[in-house]
Amino acid sequence: MEEILGIQEIKACPIRYVLAINDTLNVISGKWKLPIIGSILFGKKRFTEIQRNIAKITPRMLSKELKELELNGIVTRNVYDTTPVSVEYELSESGKNIVEVLDKMVDWGLSHRKSIMGENQK
């Protein structure tokens, strides 16, 4: 098994850097995964709550994306033995660590928008 390298070792090898980016994108890419993560970010949610938070997502697509996020260890599915059975979704520990990535994306997006809008106003 390959040892886990630190960011400095990864940055020293462009191939490993690109592979690490691809690993990340394979887990979070797509139209719906980041909105789903954003919906669950602040606490457990039931399926219908997540669906209500994301405009235009179909139940079938939400179910598919939640299963993929669960398989990738980002989301945890909790089934409660109630009548009727209730299911809640929450971010796993790995999923909670994605918040740092999302925060950086938001920072970059705001900065980028500001620079583009500033250039267009000249």
Image (cartoon, helix red, strand yellow):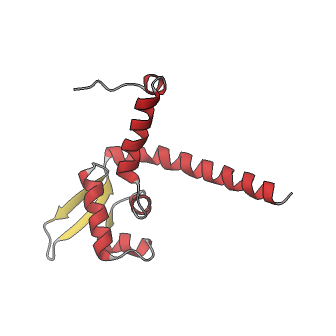
Q: Where is residue 36, by image quadrant?
A: bottom left
The residue furthest front is 15
Q: Give the position of the N terminus as an image quadrant.
A: top left
* Depth order, front residue of 93/66: 66
**Residue drawn at (25%, 60%) of the image:** 67
**Residue drawn at (68%, 50%) of the image:** 111
* Depth order, front residue of 43/25: 25
* Depth order, front residue of 114/82: 114
Specify whether 42 is left or right of 106: left
* Depth order, front residue of 112/13: 13
Residue 106 % position (x, y)? 57, 52
Residue 102 % position (x, y)? 50, 50
Specify whether 8 is left or right of 58: right
Specify whether 55 is left or right of 69: right
State how many labels appear: 0
Q: Give the position of the C terminus as an image quadrant.
A: bottom right
In the image, residue 82 sits, relative to residue 43, either above or below, namely below
**Residue drawn at (43%, 71%) of the image:** 54
Residue 118 % position (x, y)? 79, 55
Q: Where is residue 48, by image quadrant?
A: bottom left
Residue 5 % position (x, y)? 37, 25
**Residue drawn at (40%, 75%) of the image:** 52
In the image, residue 83 sits, relative to residue 29, either above or below, namely below
The residue furthest right is 122
